[in-house]
Amino acid sequence: MLSMNKPWKTLPRIGAAVALMVVGFLAFRAYGWPGLALAGGGVVMWVLLSMTRMLKVLQRTGEHPVGTVASAVMLHSRLLPGMTLLQVLALTRALGQRVGELQAPVEQYQWTDSADAAVHCTFANGKLVEWELVRP
């Protein structure tokens, strides 16, 4: 559902849809149905590569204990604002321990290393907005 109070957030989705339609139109115009099939095959390949990456990250996270990380300090130094949860999971190679309420508008996770140092990450709309390193 499109959010009317924040239209700039829907702009990338609309832009991607328009770009796909333009590529399809240009492919059809230049090469006919074979061009459209080629463009469709490219889109399907991109979707499959994205899904493969996501599944590989989730497979790696399933092999480690929840909420653990090799070094909280290294994780803290590699985090950037705007990272997605999938990108953070790829860095930690473990699912985060959920902190806070389940129905909160923001999601909070923490990862702890063997020295009891922890990184608390806050995600809003699926993007990392803030993080904090807590040492004992």
Image (cartoon, rainbow, N blue to C red):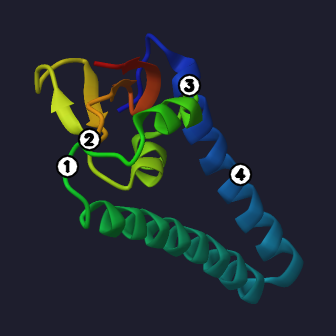
Q: Residue at x 82, y 66 (%)?
A: 26
Distance, label 2 to label 1, CA atoms, is: 6 Å
Ranked by sequence position, the earlier of labels 3 and 1 is 1
Quarter residue 46 falls in: bottom right
Residue 97 position (above or below residue 38): above
Q: Position of residue 107 (x, y in %)?
A: 26, 26
Q: Which numbered disc, 3 or 4, marks the residue closer to the eye? A: 3
C-beta proximity under 8 Å, tags 3 and 1:
no
Residue underneath mark 3 = 81
Q: Amino acid at mark 4?
A: Ala
C-beta proximity under 8 Å, tags 2 and 1:
yes
Residue underneath mark 1 = 66
Q: Which numbered disc, 1 or 4, marks the residue closer to the eye? A: 1
Q: Check disc 3: other Cα within 10 Å, few if <14, some if 14-19, many if 20+.
A: few
Q: Check disc 2: other Cα within 10 Å, few if <14, some if 14-19, many if 20+.
A: many
Q: Residue at x 77, y 75 (%)?
A: 28
Q: Amino acid at mark 2?
A: Gly
Ranked by sequence position, the earlier of labels 2 and 4 is 4
In the image, farthest residue toward the right: 30
Q: Amino acid at mark 1?
A: Val
Name the foreground residue: 130 vs 63: 63
C-beta proximity under 8 Å, tags 1 and 4:
no
Residue underneath mark 2 = 96
Ranked by sequence position, the earlier of labels 3 and 2 is 3
Residue underneath mark 4 = 19
